[in-house]
Amino acid sequence: MASNQLSGNLDLLLLSVLTAGEAHGYAVITRLRERSDGAFDLPEGTVYPALHRLERDGLLTSRWDRGSGRRRRAYALTQDGHRALEQKRRSWHDFSRGVRAVIDPGVPRATVTP
Amino acid sequence: MASNQLSGNLDLLLLSVLTAGEAHGYAVITRLRERSDGAFDLPEGTVYPALHRLERDGLLTSRWDRGSGRRRRAYALTQDGHRALEQKRRSWHDFSRGVRAVIDPGVPRATVTP
DNA sequence: CCCCATACCTAGATTGTCTAGGTATGGCGA
DNA sequence: TCGCCATACCTAGACAATCTAGGTATGGGG
């Protein structure tokens, strides 16, 4: 995948994989890789700080999980997190529609006003 | 549009609007805004340095155009530019497919191997 | 003849992702 | 049983890209 292409869309991806339910950081990375068929294989140094930032901004909560022997920090979406996810999904659709409109000149956009 | 969403995809957009033919920087900004229905209204401080970078990397050439009174720097795609554009289009398609796969869990991807 | 849209430019701020390190441990294979 | 690897977490600083905020100049319309 191109270098810094996911800049600005990482939050959308992280929040998305957490809609399936609580997960810890390492599992987020794994899920992301699996769900994208290997396209998104993010380094830990990218994901952990991003999760911390999202928690700081109130979109995620975390708890230490000692269930399976090994210590894990499990993350879950907050109410604000769900709202932000919806907003970011819309934003993504607008953005990708914009890109398509620019790179596929043949296909005109639907006109909004009659 | 979300803050830094176009990070990593700006080159794709710039090269795309230049496939229609030679254009100068200001016109690139205008075309981008029009073609995207206002979604991409990029500041000059973003576009001019990006054009310089693309020229430095050999994807664009430029010439000073004194045709219409006012001085303009007209940019055009090079051979490498065309190739890079194709590559970036493919990269975009892979990326957006990946995002869709992650954010729309219901829709499974086509399996590549039989 | 004045003003605004056009047209160009750049230094530095900002931000986000990645590199490159580090620590710790549970479980499996030898 | 013991060593090693995958799991699991973390952070400081590098790096790259975009944006902010300035600046200059000019042609043409009102």
Image: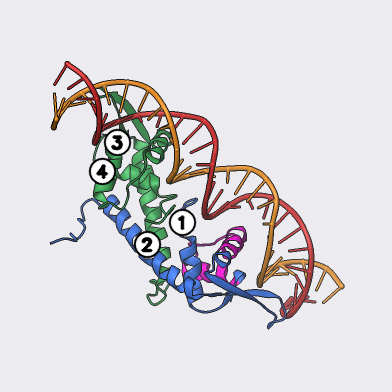
Chain colours: A green, B blue, C orange, D red
Q: Which residue is mark 4?
A: A31
Distance of label 3 from label 2 (alpha carbons): 26 Å
- Amino acid carrying label 2: it is Ser
Say above or below: A95 vs A87: below
Say above or below: B98 vs A85: below
Local packing at callout 1 (Cα closer than 10 Å; few below 14, some 14-19, many 20+) is some
Q: Which residue is mark 1?
A: B8
Residue B49 colored in magenta in the image: yes
Q: Which residues are magenta?
A: B27-53
Local packing at callout 4 (Cα closer than 10 Å; few below 14, some 14-19, many 20+) is many
Chain on which label 2 sits: B
Write down the quadrant of residue B52 in the picture. bottom right
- Amino acid carrying label 3: it is Tyr
- Amino acid carrying label 1: it is Gly
Q: Position of residue C20 (x, y in %)?
A: 45, 38
Kindly report the secondary structure that dominates the magenta region of the rendered protein: helix
Residue at (42% x, 59% y) in the render: A95
Distance of label 4 from label 3 (alpha carbons): 9 Å
Chain on which label 4 sits: A
Say above or below: A73 vs A101: above
Q: Is the same chain shared between marks 1 and 2?
A: yes
The circle on residue A26 is 3
The circle on residue B91 is 2
